[in-house]
Amino acid sequence: MDDWEKFDIPGLRGIGQTAPYFHNNSAGTLEEVVDHYMEFFKLVEANTAPGAPVPPLATTDGVHFDRRPTLEERTALIAYLRKL
């Protein structure tokens, strides 16, 4: 079966002007989108066994997935998304 180019994924260009977000329109702002994922990261961390490494979820250096974003990174990410 040839699935090449069968799924069209929208780009991020202009994402700041395309609210609401998610398949069910549950996020009205980019802040709500980023906060949704930050809460997801917290949930995964809380459900990780003590002493076990947190499963890979968020990249902090573009290569490794080792921790959730900091509040400063949250602010920078939202600013970046608005500039696209």
Image: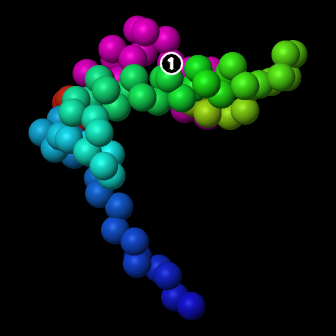
* Residue 59 visible: no
Q: Which residue is mark 1?
A: 69
Q: Which residues are magenta?
A: 60-81
Compared across the picture, whether 35 is left or right of 78 comes to right
Residue 35, x across and y down, in percent: 39, 23
- Looking at the image, residue 25 sits to the left or right of residue 70; the answer is left
- State the residue at coordinates (20%, 41%): 20
Q: Is residue 63 visible?
A: yes
Q: Quadrant of the C terminus?
A: top left
| Quadrant housing the N terminus | bottom right
- The crowding category of the residue bearing disc 1, from other C-alpha atoms within 10 Å (few below 14, some 14 to 19, many at least 20), is some
Residue 67, relative to residue 81: is it above or below? above
Question: In the image, residue 65 lies at what x, y percent?
Answer: 64, 31
Q: How is the image coloured?
A: rainbow
Residue 79 lies within the magenta run: yes
Image quarter for residue 73?
A: top left
- Residue plotted at (40% across, 8% down): 72
- The correct choice, above or below, for 51 with respect to 26 in the image is above
Residue at coordinates 29% horizontally, 57% vertically from top-left? 10
Q: 6 or 52: which is nearer to us?
A: 52
Front in this rendered view, residue 63 or 28: 28
Residue 67, x across and y down, in percent: 62, 21
Residue 8 in picture, x, y percent from top left: 34, 68
Number of marks drawn: 1
Identify which residue is drawn at 26% across, 29% down. 30
Judged left or right of residue 14, residue 35 is right
Of the residues shown, which amino acid type is indicated by label 1?
Pro
Name the element at disc 1: loop
